[in-house]
Amino acid sequence: MIDYLIQNLWLTWLLVSLVCMILEILNGDLYIMCFAVGAMFGSLVSLFTDSIVAQVIVFLFFSVLSIFLLRPVAIKYLHQSKDKRVSNAEALIGREGKVTDTIEAGGYGRVKIDGDSWKAQSVDGSEITQGDRVRILRLDSIIAMVERC
């Protein structure tokens, strides 16, 4: 098997390229993709020459070139909505929940959102009774600032 791959270096380079693409799919940071591109060019060069030095130089050249030219373009188009994604507690803003413990006037209570209980306070300082629906406007540390829906 190894003799076959040595005699057919173009196939070895294609396998390296395929492995790099699979790793890129699992990873997603778009660096390994650059090595896949370099391996594809190494495969093309191996069709024309048996010099392993030339193949490795072409592999390195196109890998580095891809990092500086291809990767920024790919990131620009694949991660267009990066700034728009919210996660963790920020994803709660604008969500609706149900008051489980009455929110006292100027005080605190509890709100249940997607099965999680949050300490809550009314934005305008009014009392919100148990069972009322509320909307989260912002988070102050671990306290949800809410208003009636």
Image: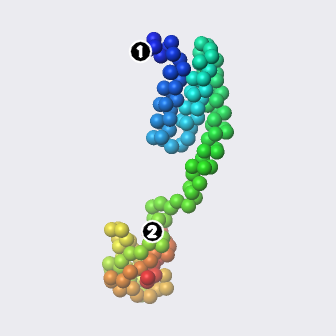
> Which of these two is toward me, 49 or 117?
49
- Give the image quarter of residue 119: bottom left
Which corner quadrant holds the C terminus? bottom left
Spatial distance from mark 2 to mark 1, Cα to Cα?
A: 56 Å
Neighbours of disc 1 within 10 Å: few (<14), some (14-19), many (20+):
few
Instruction: Say which of marks 2 and 1 sits in front.
Output: 1
- Give the image quarter of residue 142: bottom left
Looking at the rendered structure, the kind of residue marked 1 is Met
Percent x, y for residue 8? Answer: 51, 16
Percent x, y for residue 48? Answer: 62, 16
Labels 2 and 1: the sequence-earlier one:
1
Residue under numbered circle 1: 1
Q: Secondary structure at mark 1?
A: loop
Residue 28 lies, with reference to residue 36, above or below; the image says below
Q: Which mark is residue 56?
A: none
Q: Secondary structure at mark 2?
A: helix
Q: Do we see residue 92 in this rendering?
A: yes
Percent x, y for residue 130? Answer: 33, 83
Q: Which residue: 43% across, 83% down?
A: 148
Q: Which residue: 63% across, 37% down?
A: 67
Looking at the rendered structure, the kind of residue marked 2 is Leu
Residue farthest to the front, as pictured: 47
Residue under numbered circle 2: 92
Q: Which residue: 46% across, 13% down?
A: 4
Neighbours of disc 2 within 10 Å: few (<14), some (14-19), many (20+):
some
How is colour applied across the structure in the image? rainbow
Residue 73 lies, with reference to residue 132, above or below; the image says above
Which corner quadrant holds the N terminus? top left
> Which of these two is toward me, 77 or 138?
77
